[in-house]
């Protein structure tokens, strides 16, 4: 059964992931759109086996790429689904969508579901990592992606939301080396986002943190108002201990140890190191933070 839903998948060199992603959506979605950032592997060759709606656009960041897609693709369906190339819609989620999407009330414009993250075949259930609720389905033109350099989320313009029982599945099949390279890039962007909170370098349209809001809003409040104001580096150690010990990350086994250490300690330490580097160079040179970011990372804000 086809649903009145269009899927958007952003890609760059995703030959190891894209086929499983496409197989999970192609039989129930009316349209599947690929927005590619000029891949030089077999991503497009694989994608064209499943859909003829393949577009290419220069990449700046995830938010801008997704918003470009929403504004420029020939979308004809009532509903949208955003899914990453390393994610798959689980069969039970597909069946739930088939049953529930046609019955969604008119005042509901967004739908949340949970994400299961797998690392080297291991479901990362602990460390506060599951469940993570994501707004990934919305009525066309009723939501946009918040304008952030990293950790971007969909934001409803109006209307209510519903929550589904079942999950999507995420497992990146790329090598650990490529995972580290990607997170190095994320760390640069997160360092800039964090400095922006302190120095108000640029304006963004963003989901506001709130202890009384959604899971995303609660986590953002804690990140910006508690973690974000704690001393550099010390907060990394405290966060890892909290996540690995108190949030039971150690129960995820060896794969969990690797994941929680890299994602919850190494990555966070790298973000703080980049913040420290930018502020140190700005102080020593007398140049503004914005100029140092441009000099070090060739990013114009």
Image (cartoon, rainbow, N blue to C red):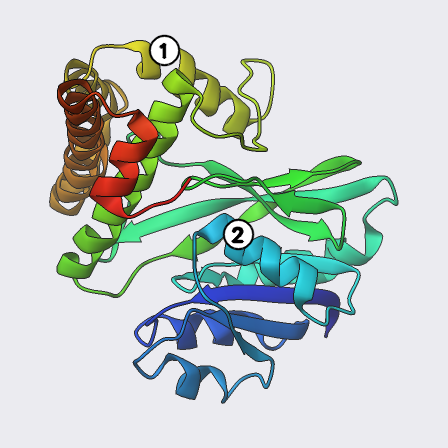
- At 35% from the left edge and 48% from the top edge, which residue is drawn? 117
- Residue 283 horizontal/vertical position (percent): 18, 18
- At 17% from the left edge and 20% from the top edge, which residue is drawn? 241
Front one among 106 and 63: 63
Front one among 41 and 192: 192
- Residue 43 horizontal/vertical position (percent): 38, 79
142 is higher (above) or lower (below) than 234: below
Front one among 159 and 35: 35
The quarter of the picture where residue 278 lies is top left
Q: Which residue is mark 1?
A: 226
Mark 1 burial class by Cα count in 10 Å: few <14, some 14-19, many 20+ = few
The quarter of the picture where residue 260 lies is top left
Q: Earlier in the sequence, mark 1 or mark 2?
A: 2
Q: Which residue is mark 2?
A: 64
- Residue 273 horizontal/vertical position (percent): 15, 29
**Dot 1: what SS?**
loop
Q: Nearer the viewer, mark 1 or mark 2?
A: 2
């Amino acid at each position: 059964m086809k649903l009145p839903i269009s899927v958007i998948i952003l890609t760059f060199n995703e030959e190891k992931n894209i086929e499983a992603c496409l197989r999970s959506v192609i039989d129930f979605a009316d349209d599947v759109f690929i927005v590619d950032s000029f891949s030089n592997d077999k991503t497009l060759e694989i994608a064209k086996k499943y859909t003829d709606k393949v577009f290419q656009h220069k990449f700046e960041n995830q938010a801008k790429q997704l918003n470009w897609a929403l504004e420029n693709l020939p979308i004809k369906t009532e509903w949208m689904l955003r899914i990453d190339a390393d994610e798959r819609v689980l069969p039970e989620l597909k069946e739930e969508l088939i049953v529930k999407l046609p019955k969604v009330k008119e005042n509901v414009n967004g739908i949340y579901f949970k994400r299961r993250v797998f690392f080297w075949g291991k479901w990362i259930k602990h460390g506060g990592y599951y469940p993570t609720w994501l707004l990934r389905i919305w009525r066309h033109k009723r939501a946009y992606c918040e304008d952030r350099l990293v950790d971007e989320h969909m934001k409803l313009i109006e209307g209510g939301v519903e929550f589904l029982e079942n999950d999507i599945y995420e497992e990146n099949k790329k090598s650990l080396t490529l995972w580290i390279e990607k997170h190095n890039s994320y760390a640069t962007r997160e360092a800039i986002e964090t400095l922006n909170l302190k120095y108000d370098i640029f304006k963004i349209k963003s989901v506001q943190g709130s202890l009384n809001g959604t899971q995303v809003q609660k986590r953002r409040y804690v990140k910006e108002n508690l973690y974000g104001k704690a001393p550099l580096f010390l907060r990394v150690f405290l966060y890892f201990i909290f996540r690995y010990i108190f949030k039971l990350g150690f129960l995820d086994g060896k794969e969990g140890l690797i994941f929680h250490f890299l994602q919850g300690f190494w990555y966070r330490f790298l973000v703080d190191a980049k913040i420290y580097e930018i502020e140190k160079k700005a102080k020593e040179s007398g140049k503004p933070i914005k100029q140092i970011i441009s000099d070090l990372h060739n990013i114009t804000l």
